[in-house]
Amino acid sequence: MVVVKKTVAIHPILDEYIRQTWSILIKKGHDATYSTALNYMLLTEVLYFAGFTENEISENIQSFLDDENSLRDINLEDYANKADELFRQKDKEQNLS
């Protein structure tokens, strides 16, 4: 799994759909993060526009969701970024004190 660290601007409407997808994935029992949901949505659309059949799209999406190593890599990156953000915030708050 290639993990790219880039800043991506997400339109508020797209953000809402990503968050809804994230919620659905969690409700279905997947250990999902925002990035997992975004990857899920992008993969679905890429396969659709590449001409895959509904069945092929479904199989590939399920394969993605079953790929524990890839999902772990995606989730770890999200968790590490969140931890870094929290540490920076804590340092900033301590410096203001």
Image (cartoon, rainbow, N blue to C red):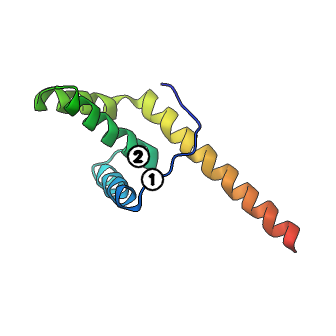
First in residue order: circle 2 vs circle 1: 1
Q: Residue at x 79, y 69 (%)?
A: 93
**Identity, as a three-letter code, of the amino acid under mark 1:** Ile
Q: Residue at x 40, y 61 (%)?
A: 12
Q: Residue at x 35, y 60 (%)?
A: 13
User: Given the current orientation, which residue lies at the most extreme bottom position?
Assistant: 97
Q: Residue at x 37, y 28 (%)?
A: 67
Residue for badge 1: 10
**Identity, as a three-letter code, of the amino acid under mark 2:** Ala
In this rendering, is residue 39 above or below 23? above
In this rendering, is residue 58 above or below 20? above
> Residue 69 vs residue 85: left or right?
left
> Residue 67 vs residue 49: left or right?
right
Residue 87 versus residue 13: which sits nearer the camera? 13
Secondary-structure class at tag 2 = loop
Q: Dot 2 surroundings within 10 Å: few (below 14), some, or many (20 or more)? A: many
| Tag nearer the camera, 2 or 1 | 1
Separation of marks 2 and 1 at Cα, in angstroms: 18 Å
Which labelled disc corresponds to residue 50? none
Which labelled disc corresponds to residue 32? 2
Residue 50 lies, in percent from the top left, at 22, 26
Secondary-structure class at tag 1 = loop
Answer with the quarter of the image where residue 68 lies: top left
Residue 37 lies, in percent from the top left, at 37, 46
Residue 90 lies, in percent from the top left, at 76, 63
> Residue 78 vs residue 26: left or right?
right
